[in-house]
Amino acid sequence: MSRRARSQILLLSLLALPLAATAAPQASKPATLPPGVAADWLEKLNPSIDSKTAAYIVMNDHPMGSQIRIHEGSQQIAGHPFVVAPMTASVRGMDVSGYQGNVNWNGAWANGARFTYIKATEGTYYKNPYFTQQYNGSYNVGMIRGSYHFARPDTTSGATQADYFVNHGGGWSKDGKTLPGVIDMEYNPYGSTCYGLSQRQMAAWITSFSNEYHYRTSRWPVIYTSNSWWSQCVGTAGNWSNNSPLWVARYASAVGTLPWPWGFYTFWQFADSGVFPGDQNLFNGAYSRLVALANG
């Protein structure tokens, strides 16, 4: 079946879904694609995913960086997404979501990936249907892995979403193979950039999530964001740099300006396609430091 035919079938499946089955707040039955989903994201779907599951993913799953690419674009070179030379002390890795379905972890390992982050949840309405295969499969080939949560600050409190995340894959254990969970802070797929919150309100929401995640796991979450979104929606209203590692998104050959007030980054998402399934990332340090981050 061609990609175009598959896309048409998927869109029909989306239209056929009852609204109750797509529990994303503020979403309605789509005439074409749901809010916050770029047309080419259908091309990113693993073709082995059945139409019903694919429709559930497209309706609810906004992968890490998907909104940043829509709003900020990409400077990566077409056909050559791995445009940066790895740093002297760095570790190559990836992040995946429901779009990747069952991942070939042996292949990713053979290509050099040594860590991965896997989407677990979004808001309090979505769980990645492929989380178990992705989370356990990456561990079984030897990767250091963790999970991430796409934040919806306009729907429920930070603490409520932290609990939902921990209860559905966002936990942590000191085994040298589990990284602290990530809170994915980026553009609102359903409306206003900052989810209708002031910078002070956004900072309070992040603090609520962060404190609850720490209470539940003993770890502070990694914060994923872009400098542009952070400058608009958080600014200088809060400082988590003493506890939370920064994961910065910028699809270019250099990381650029960092969000205030971090002086360095821990992870860099530099491309949304490449040699690994999903997004392409670098850990800013030697492998031993990655293990140290996992161990806390």
Image: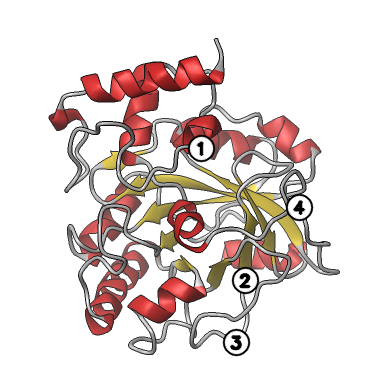
- The CA distance from mark 3 to mark 2 is 10 Å
Q: Which residue is mark 2?
A: 266
The residue under the point 45% across, 31% down is 130
Q: Amino acid at mark 1?
A: Asp
In three-dimensional space, the C-alpha distance between marks 4 and 3, rounded to whole angstroms, equals: 25 Å
Give left or right: position of 78 versus 126.
right
Q: In terms of depth relative to the viewer, which is nearer, 117 or 16? A: 16
Question: How busy is the neighbourhood of tag 4: few (under 14 within 10 Å), some, or many (20 plus)?
Answer: many
Q: Residues within 10 Å of mark 3 (few under 14, many from 20)?
A: few
Earlier sequence position, callout 4 versus callout 2: 4
Quadrant of the image occupied by residue 107: top right
From mark 4 to mark 2, how far is it between C-alphas? 19 Å
Q: Do the CB atoms of the residues marked 3 and 2 lie less than 8 Å apart?
A: no
Tell which circle, 1 or 2, labels the residue nearer the N-terminal end.
1
Mark 1 sits on what residue?
40
Q: Can you identify the residue that label 4 sits on? A: 82
